[in-house]
Amino acid sequence: MLSIHHFVITAILAIITMFYSVFFYYFLNDQQQKTDLIIDSIQHDIAETSYIISTEMTSIRTIRTFKSFLNRKVAGSPLISQMSIGYGNKILIGTDASINTIPPNHSIVSSFKNISTSKLLKLQVFESTIDYFIQDQPVKLSLFIYVDHKYINNYFSENQSTYLLFFGLIPLLGLGLLWLILRNYITTPLESLRLYAYNQNKTPKPFKLKELEYVRASMEQTFDRLEHEKHELYRLARTDSLSGLANRSQLNERLSWLISEASRDNSEFAVVFVDLDNFKTVNDSLGHDIGDELLKNVADLIRHVLREYDIIARVGGDEFVIVLSHYKSNFELTHIIQRIIDRISELHIIESHPIRVSASIGVAFYPQDGSDITGLMKSADIAMYEAKKLGKNQFKFFTKALHKQVLKEIELEHSMRNALKNDEFELFYQPKMLTNHEEVVGAEALIRWIHPTKGLIPPNDFIPAAEKNGLIVELGQWILQEVVRQQIEWKNSGIADIQLSVNLSATQFLDDHFDDKFESILKQSGIDPKKLDVEITESVFLENSQQNLDTLNKIRALGVSISLDDFGTGYSSLAYLKSLPIDTLKIDKSFLNDHDTETGSIFIETIVKLARTLKLNVVAEGIETQQQIDYLDRIGCHTYQGYYCAPPIPVDEFEAFIRLKGHKCGPDKE
Amino acid sequence: MKTIKILFLFALTVIGLSSCSSKEDKPLKIVANSWIGYSPLFYAKASGWLEPLNIELSTVVSLGESLHIYKSSNKDAFTGTQYEFSQAYQKDNTLMPIMMFDRSNGGDMVMGNQSVESLKSATSPINVYLEINSINYVVFKDFIKQNKLEDKTFNFINKDQLKIVSAIAEAPNHEPKIAVTYIPYNYSLEKHGFTTLASTRDGLNLLVLDALYTNKESFSLHQEQFKRLKILIDRAIQDLQNDPKLFYDKVNPYLENSSFEEFQSGLQDIVWINQSLSPQLIERLNQAQFPIRDLL
């Protein structure tokens, strides 16, 4: 592809070639025209002279009388230097005395046709005949005209010089000037614009041509904006927009660099995973704006606590990762971390709301707790969860034991998934009895894992894990389906048409489609919704309370009753009782254990009275003695469940239990 | 692209305008001498017919001068008799007659201040005024032959027709003098006592044709102009026949201001042969090796 510089040079050369071709043609043509004019003039002089002599001369002897005529002709014509008249090989007269011989043939030209300029410049003598008659006999006299070479040469020379000046030199200078102008005003600016567009390193100086200057200014403006936007994008790509801290991308980048550095130096650094405790509550109760402000506050104070070169990043909603290096000792490190915890625990005033949050922190070290980013983050995360598990607002170092525990949890999750697939889970049923009639009024379904090698695994060993890893959703659905199926089977088989209770975990409520699935199971099975009871704990309302409340209302609207399990062990807020769609309160076993103490009985009786006042059913859990039953009967709680009557038992045993309806519960039941 | 188109159109316009404004057809330059036979040419010029055809007509006094001007001044065509044609043909063999005007039927004549009989008895040399390098010489030679004057001594005085008239006016009247001339110069000589001794009508056995000659190069260059000129000449002769007086008024300045009567008399001494040539004439022309194949 042609550059503008070469293009302009080519164009100018083309113009020069074209111009000078035309000029040269015109010049030659003009030369020839001038030559033709000169020849015409000479020819005319010759013809005229010849004719006058031929008609005026009375005899050859009188030819001398024409000398003055010839002299006048020579004097009057600048083209002619001399004239002479010859007869035979003698010169009769001439304008110059030195001419006394006939010019040699090679220097004589008789034809006036096709004489070029170069030939004219070489010509010396023109010859023409004078048609003279002596009486009636023709006599051939020759008229010789000597060309004034000096004059003609000068004439053409001057003409040539003039042409060269006006058509050669001046246009050449003009074209040179044009080239300079084009170069300075167009090609060089365009070249600098090209370089600017390509390299963007040196901004060209302002140009004199308006359009080019517009392009330059526009490019400069665009490049400035692009540079600014590039920096801004780079910054945004690496920065968390809310807190102004590094984001995960920058964290990964800097951690990679730090790992390479530490790997070379054999040094270590700490990855600190910070998670705010109960931040979701702040968001839910005070709104996301307040939550965001709180995060900014936390980010600021972490930044103030740490040093300039420490890496601080926000990697999730309320999760921060801090990378600490160059600490002198673990003491200094723990001191820094503790300061972070302390500062976060301080009271935050956000838009006049006093907020108190805490942070759980996990710490992992390079290289012993992870040799890459994923490993280190995972280890710090595990340690952070350990801190949360141990009561929050504290920090924990990642340990091998923790690691083992995590592995164990992973293995457990794997086994649970297999168990679900291999039908290793089984539902046990614990009957709910009336205190006076000893009648089975219902049963609570409780899951058991019958491991093929380990045998019976108690729920406490896998339910928390299932809640943690989310398997509880799938497991809960299986339980619900199984309970519904069992209720219908018992009803259809005539064994019992009792209400069965199923426990719902708070985690199950996190599933957005839980209520739809619940309703679908009920409708597909055809169970009488009144024969189904769901048991929940207060924990269901600690998070997403409104959403969970909506779900419960939908369940209840289907006709399913709701029991509040372990009542009295949690917050036991009266507000819950007011707002929740609850049908039954289940008094926790821990209360029943103290029924024979004054304080214990007060609590139990208060709960029973409360239920009665709120027109709620009440069921006592963990009943182990007749004394407890009697007590319950006395205070107005007529339904119980517990080992006194029956532990959770497999289906066949439960069916047998039912068949023995009327069999008295207690130590002598056998 | 648009700019290139505009520049191209501009260049075309400039070239077109410059060629239209400054470049006309090359003029057809004709030289003719004063002769009644060429009066249609003069009529065409006086009527303004030649200008639109870009034809320039120059008039000279004599036949010899016509030939001389043709040769020396780069004219494209000249008028003359077959004698001038043969003279010029020797130097340019592409020369050809392209337009016939007339045949002299008394228009060329030999005049004298004495009768032929007196001339025969003259003992001293007789001065003969003529344009020696023209048809005059041929006419005179035929006169000598027809009147058997070969034994006489003649002193040839070579002048053009106007100078002949002047010289005769100045020369002593008693000397026997002969002038070879043609219309309209005969009228001036008659005023000096000259009478016609012989003419192409009477006393001479000579064919004198008047025509327009050009060479091959000029003809190819001005072919169209020649063709249109031929039409105009025919038209002029037609005008002459329709209204001789009007014709005369226009051509008189070219014919030495002869009177209308002289003009009419002169017309009797020529025969127009512009339209066609008789077979007899064609035969005579062929015998004289006068080319007629290129006649318009």
Image (cartoon, coloured by chain):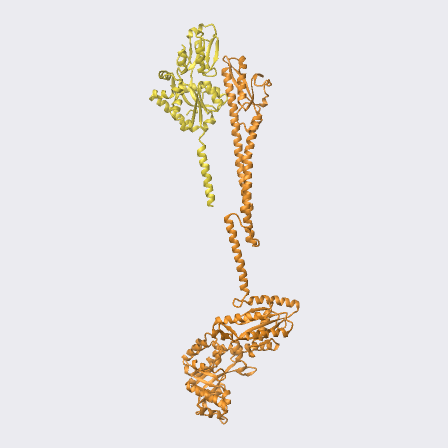
Say if residue B83 shows up in the picture: no
- At horizontal 50% and vertical 18% (from top left) the residue drawn is A51
Q: In the image shown, does A41 or A408 lie closer to the viewer?
A: A41
Tell me the colour chain B is drawn in.
Answer: yellow
Tell me the colour chain A is drawn in.
Answer: orange
Q: For the view shown, which residue lies furthest in the bottom direction?
A: A668
Q: Quadrant of residue B233?
A: top left
User: Residue A207, position in %: x, y?
Assistant: 53, 49
User: Residue A454, position in %: x, y?
Assistant: 57, 82
Residue A642 versus residue A404 in the image, above or below: below
Q: In the image shown, does A12 or A521 lie closer to the viewer?
A: A12
Q: Quadrant of residue B53?
A: top left
How many marks the image carries: the answer is: 0
Residue A588 versus residue A203 in the image, above or below: below
- At horizontal 53% and vertical 56% (from top left) the residue drawn is A223
Say if residue B270 shows up in the picture: yes
Q: For the view shown, which residue lies furthest in the left direction?
A: B242
User: Residue A596, position in %: x, y?
Assistant: 50, 92
Does residue A255 appear to the left or right of B220 in the view shown?
A: right
Residue A593 versus residue A404 in the image, above or below: below
Q: For the view shown, which residue lies furthest in the front direction?
A: A352
User: Residue B84, position in %: x, y?
Assistant: 46, 19
Q: In the image shown, does A495 or A411 lie closer to the viewer?
A: A411
Residue A140 versus residue A263 in the image, above or below: above
